Amino acid sequence: MIESINSRSVSYRTVDKRLMIFISVAVLLSLLVGITCAADITFTAVVDRTALDVTDTFTLTLQVEGSVSRVSDPKLPELSDFRIISGPNESSTFQIINTNYSLIKSWSYVLKPKRTGTLTIESVRLTHKGKIYSTEPIFLQVGSRTVTTTPGSAKRTTPLPQTTDKESSELFVRVTADKNRIFQNEQVILTYIIYTRVSVNAYEISHLPATPGFWTEEFDSSKQPAVQDEVIGGRHYKKAVIRRVALFSTHPGEMIIDPLEVTCQVQVQRQSRRRQDPFDMMFDSPFSRYRTEERFIQTDPLKLTVLPLPDEGKPRNFSGAVGNFSMEVKIDRDEVSTNEAITMSVRFNGTGNIKLLPQPDFSVPPDFEAYEPKESIKINKSGAKIFGSKTFEYVLIPRIPGKSAIPSINFAYFNPSSGTYQTIKERGFEISVTRSGDGDYGSPSGISREEVKLLAKDVRYLKTPGRLYAVGSAQNLPFAYWVGVALPPLIIVILWWAARLLGAPTLQVRRQQHRIYHKSKDKLKSLVKRTSDTNASATYGAIHNTLLNFLSTKLAIPASGLMEDDVLKELKKRDVPEDIMTTLNDIFNECNAARFAMEVTDQDVLRRLLKRVDIVLDRIEKTWGNKL
């Protein structure tokens, strides 16, 4: 009897102990999920600088901090004096200290002022649980640069800088002109080039400069722009042409080309704060050591001097054409009957603003009826300059039989190379007109040319009905429910990994060298699945970084600031065969060229490159292993 009572007592104590553990875990989860009601939040707005130039950009950061699980997005005030370059870029940080839960969430915007003076960013508002939070207004002093401008262009108040410190930067963009002094309506070529010493995964021209006072023609961009090496100030850079444009000025004066802005996705190395922490050792893989950072670069303003065309030697029939041209005049036949059409074509060829060439000065004979000429233009934008042809096609109908003369055609233009006016003259034609069979040669015929346009039919998109979910279904469950479900197993997994790691040997370098081969192979397998993505530039960047991370880990060289040339030199010191060195160099060059491409790369080419990288990794691992 006593033994039975004792066994029951032990059983009750066991049940009570389990029940207390269950209650403790439930209370802990309730604290973690329901802590959102425990405290208030703080909401602030800051900028990285308050004094800047009108061509500069700055970062506006909005931050919320408090014991909450989530907050709504803030509402920006009207930013009429600013242009949003990018944003919002969101980031969140969660902290759990004992039973205290804290969230820090920020939204960052890159802005650019539209004018000079004292500009104000009004209060930003955020609503949380029915309460409105507001930031303090922010005041910025925006200056500008001084140049002598033509009427209608903006005035600037500080001198243009003659030198820059861009050569000391790791990433910058530069614009050059083939000439800085030009005549009115003369062609000038602007070339925009990116220079980089860092790994650029992708880039985008985020803002094209306005060009008031110029007629512009964009050059055709290459699918695979050449990536070249250049040494600037003793430092090696990779460079690529990202834009070429031809400008034709419409009036003389001192002209300023505003900056072009580029957004780049740059791979940078993470800074580890706790190198001895076992969790850092667990997650510190070669791929987690890097993060993608968005950077904004822009060119300096470019000054061009536009000279007026000289009055000396200007022909009376000069109509404003500037360049270097030739002229060709043809007729389809010189013997016709009355009321039959003759086609005369006048074709201009050369370099210059082909599109704006006017009709030739042509006098129609009185015994001919003429129609408005049909114009056709062919422009070639793939060479060093814009060139092409413009053709005027006239339909002439003789009404009276006999001998008729089409007079010669003169064309005057200004040649900027010689600085003189030149005139081209083409001979006239004599037409023999015979009487038509109907004898009615004095009445005009109904001959005309009409262009028929086919209009596409509009097809309206039919909006499909939305999906409906039953009340109480999984789609309607609250966020706190999913946190409560996912948190316990997540804590168990983290504790299991921590216990396993703390009991393992800490040979971190050798372990990374042993694992980097398999991780690189897995990365390549994932990239093979992405060959159909439209963002081929990012895929090439990932291939480049995977190969560079593999080699840096095998060589035990810090990857921060590591260039391809450094890796190849180190491999050469360790007697790696020349054919592998050549293959690695070819792969690096192909990746660098493709990362600056503006269009989608052929998927077959990308798959072949991935296969080559896979073979190189296999050969290096099987031949040397950890001997490098």
Image (tube, helix red, strand yellow):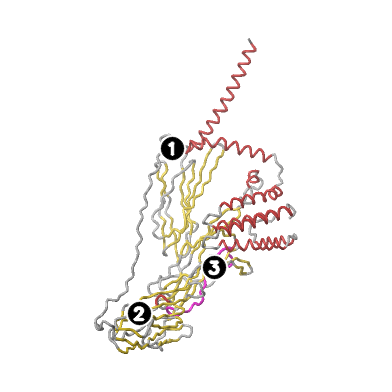
- Find residue 210 and report its horizontal and vertical position in percent: 43, 68
Q: Where is 254 relative to 68, above or below?
A: below
Instruction: Give whichever of discs 1 and 3 has the lower sequence position.
Output: 3
Rounded to the nearest angstrom, the CA distance separating label 3 from label 2 is: 42 Å
Front residue of 244/444: it is 444
- Which residue lies at the image location 51% right of the left edge and 67% below the top edge? 221
Looking at the image, can residue 306 be seen? yes
Q: Which residue is mark 1?
A: 476
Looking at the image, can residue 544 be seen? no
Front residue of 212/625: it is 625
Q: Which quarter of the figure is the C terminus placed in?
A: bottom right
Q: Which residue is mark 2?
A: 394
Instruction: Give whichever of discs 3 and 2 has the lower sequence position.
Output: 3
Label 2, residues with CA under 10 Å away: few <14, some 14-19, many ≥20: some
Residue 403 within the magenta-colored segment of the rendering: no
SS type, badge 1: helix
SS type, badge 3: strand
Q: Which residues are magenta?
A: 166-185
Label 1, residues with CA under 10 Å away: few <14, some 14-19, many ≥20: few
Front residue of 392/336: it is 336
Rounded to the nearest angstrom, the CA distance separating label 1 from label 3 is: 52 Å
Q: Which residue is mark 3?
A: 241
Q: Specify the quadrant of the image occupied by residue 202.
A: bottom right
